[in-house]
Amino acid sequence: MVRITVIVVIVGGMLIAGLTWWTTDRERRLRAEITAIETRMVAEIARRDAAIARLGRDRRIARLEVVERSEDLGGEGPRTSLLFIELDDEGREIARRELDVPGDVIYVDAWTARFPAESVASADDPFRDRTLVLLRRIYSDRMPPREGIPIDTPGGVPDGYAGSEEARFEQAIWKRFWTLASDPEAAEEAGIRVAQGEAVYKPMRPGESYELRVEAAGGMTLIPVRAQANAMNRDP
């Protein structure tokens, strides 16, 4: 009887020890699995947030400052004098032009090449991670586009670029822009979602200032940034 009791105690102890080890090992492995899952989730959330941030980016490419508007010169209607300031990717001035156009609704015309959202979001290709823009001309509501004032020469090197690999990539797009705009196979081969001309425009008054911005996965926007109080007090 004593022997049986001893055997039962030993076997029971072994079972309890084995169960304890199995439970502890299982808990350890479960904790490791949970930690790995949490790590993957954190990394995936970080990737998602970075992709959303990249898709939501925009950048300044120019600033327009309205200097003066003259009214009814010889019955020809108003004329608007403005300063067009081109900016680099860091927002630094790289060129400026003083312009004078008839009318007071100012248009900024450009060629744009947009890339697929996944290319912009992933940033795997630094040449296709944002919309490309070639500024072409400025005109007005009283001025036909073909008579607009040129800003950059299509197919040439824009003011904001040097002879870098990126510049060569963009020049290749501008040189065959209308092919890419009208031939879906050519556009797909170049990794372009859509190539098109577009213009943004607004009525402008003296003292106002506007930023010309480009969305990473979209087009151009013209945003008012300042209205000087003294513009309201100018002599007629």
Image: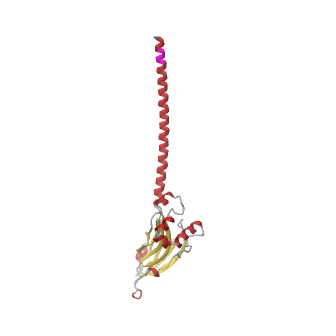
Percent across and percent down for residue 27 are 47, 34
Question: How many discs mark residues in the rendered view?
Answer: 0
Q: Residue at x 47, y 44 (%)?
A: 38
Task: Judge whether residue 8 is colored magenta.
Answer: yes
Q: Residue at x 49, y 36 (%)?
A: 29
Percent across and percent down for residue 64 are 47, 73
Where's the N terminus, which quadrant? Answer: top left
Q: Residue at x 47, y 27 (%)?
A: 19
In the picture as drawn, the residue positioned furthest to the top comes out as 1
Task: Judge whether residue 6 is colored magenta.
Answer: yes
Which residue range is magenta in the image?
5-9
Asked which colour scheme the image uses, the reply is secondary structure
Q: Nearer the viewer, residue 84 or 160?
A: 160
Image vertical order of residue 160 relative to residue 56, above or below: below
Q: Residue at x 41, y 74 (%)?
A: 202
In the picture as drawn, the residue positioned furthest to the right comes out as 163
Q: Nearer the viewer, residue 221 or 28?
A: 28
Where's the C terminus, which quadrant? Answer: bottom left
Percent across and percent down for residue 25 are 50, 32
Q: Nearer the viewer, residue 223 or 209?
A: 223
Image vertical order of residue 28 relative to residue 67, above or below: above
Percent across and percent down for residue 229 are 42, 72
Q: Main secondary structure of the magenta part?
A: helix
In the picture as drawn, the residue positioned furthest to the front comes out as 185
